[in-house]
């Protein structure tokens, strides 16, 4: 494949990783076990795939770029199962059902799609063991950020609701072709076996609504949920606080209370 290397496409956000040491470090961080079912997001020109196929795993390689599909087929043949599609169009829960096993995800994902790919994975949280993804360093810092920090926001709260994320290591922009304008980081998302028993849709709406009005207090943001001033006064949180001061636990408490108030309001 090396002699057939395709030119990275800007429209697909392609930056091919060229450093073998970094690639090995990524694979080592996975601690692969015999029989693991691994989904590689964005096989590209096969740099990471080449190392993964050396392990006794079932590798499902997902690639949207039609130019590299014949090259991947030619080099890896039956050693991989190739999906020529966008990861966000794949029903991950169905894959888990088909292979009778939870999946492990790895990939160097297009940075402009980070949030939408993560939210797609979170939608299928019960089908996934973990995801080890290369993202922009600033985004990685947001994912693992704690309350009362500048980086703490929607991505922090939602990532920490569905997973236990860890920033494993940072990666210099110099090991990619073409060289991106930002540095990268590898983040491991360990998916939770059980997530908090709340109305997920309401939880996500509250997190998005409050951070969408970041400079506003909770009191201002929560008015959009059809709660009267009297209802708001019954909430167990100081509504003059701002969303970036709330812990995940407090967002969950808030969701439970808003859910109960909404039900009473409709009775």
Image (spheres, grey):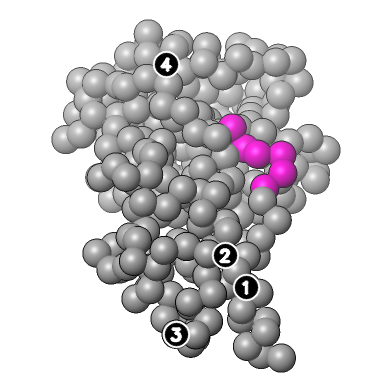
- Dot 3: element: helix
Q: Label 1: how many residues lie within 10 Å, few (<14), some (14-19) or many (20+)?
A: some
- Which is more foreground, mark 1 or mark 4? 1
| Disc 1 to disc 4, C-alpha distance | 46 Å
Of the two numbered discs 1 and 4 on the same chain, state the one appearing first in sequence: 4
Q: Which mark is residue 259?
A: 1
Q: Which quadrant: the N terminus? A: top left
Quadrant of the image occupied by residue 183: top left
Classed neighbour count for the residue bearing mark 4: other residues with Cα under 10 Å, few (<14), some (14–19), many (≥20): some
Where is residue 133 shown, x and y percent of the image? Answer: 46, 32
Nearest the viewer among 80 and 222 is: 222
Q: State whether residue 253 is above or below residue 192.
A: below
Question: How far, Cα to Cα, is label 2 from label 3?
Answer: 17 Å
Is 135 on the left-hand or right-hand side of 189? left
Q: Residue 23 got which mark?
A: 4
Residue drawn at x 55%, y 49% is 249
Q: Is residue 247 above or below residue 73?
A: below
Residue designated by label 2:
255
Tell me which numbered mark, 2 or 3, is placed earlier along the sequence. Answer: 3
Horizontally, residue 39 falls left or right of residue 50, namely right
Q: Residue 89 in the image: x percent, y percent? A: 56, 56
> For the residues marked 1 and 3, what is the alpha-carbon distance in whole angstroms?
16 Å
- Residue 110 in percent (x, y) is at 36, 42
- The magenta region covers 190-195
The structure residue drawn at horizontal position 39% and vertical position 68%, both measured from the top left corner, is: 239
Q: Secondary structure at mark 1?
A: helix
Circle 2 or circle 3, nearest the eye: 3
Q: Which residue was labeled with disc 3?
A: 229
């Amino acid at each position: 494949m090396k002699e057939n290397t395709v030119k990275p496409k800007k429209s697909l956000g392609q930056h091919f990783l060229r450093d073998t040491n970094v690639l090995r470090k990524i694979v080592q961080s996975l601690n692969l076990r015999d029989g693991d079912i691994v989904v590689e997001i964005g096989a590209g020109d096969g740099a990471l795939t080449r190392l993964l196929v050396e392990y006794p795993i079932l590798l499902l390689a997902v690639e949207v770029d039609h130019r590299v599909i014949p090259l991947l087929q030619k080099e890896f043949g039956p050693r991989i199962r190739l999906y020529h599609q966008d990861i966000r169009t794949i029903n991950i829960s169905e894959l888990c059902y088909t292979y009778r096993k939870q999946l492990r995800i790895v990939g160097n994902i297009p940075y402009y799609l980070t949030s939408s790919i993560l939210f797609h994975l979170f939608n299928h949280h019960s089908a996934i063991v973990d995801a080890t993804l290369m993202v922009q360093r600033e985004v990685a810092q947001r994912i693992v950020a704690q309350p009362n920090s500048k980086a703490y926001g929607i991505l922090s709260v939602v990532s920490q609701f569905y997973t236990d994320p860890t920033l494993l290591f940072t990666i210099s922009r110099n090991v990619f072709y073409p060289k991106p304008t930002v540095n990268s980081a590898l983040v491991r998302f360990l998916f939770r076996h059980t997530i908090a028993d709340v109305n997920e849709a309401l939880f996500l709406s509250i997190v998005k609504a409050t951070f969408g009005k970041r400079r506003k207090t909770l009191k201002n943001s929560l008015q959009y949920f059809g709660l009267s001033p009297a209802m708001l006064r019954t909430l167990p949180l100081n509504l003059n606080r701002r969303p970036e001061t709330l812990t995940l636990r407090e967002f969950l408490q808030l969701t439970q209370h808003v859910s109960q108030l909404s039900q009473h309001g409709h009775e």
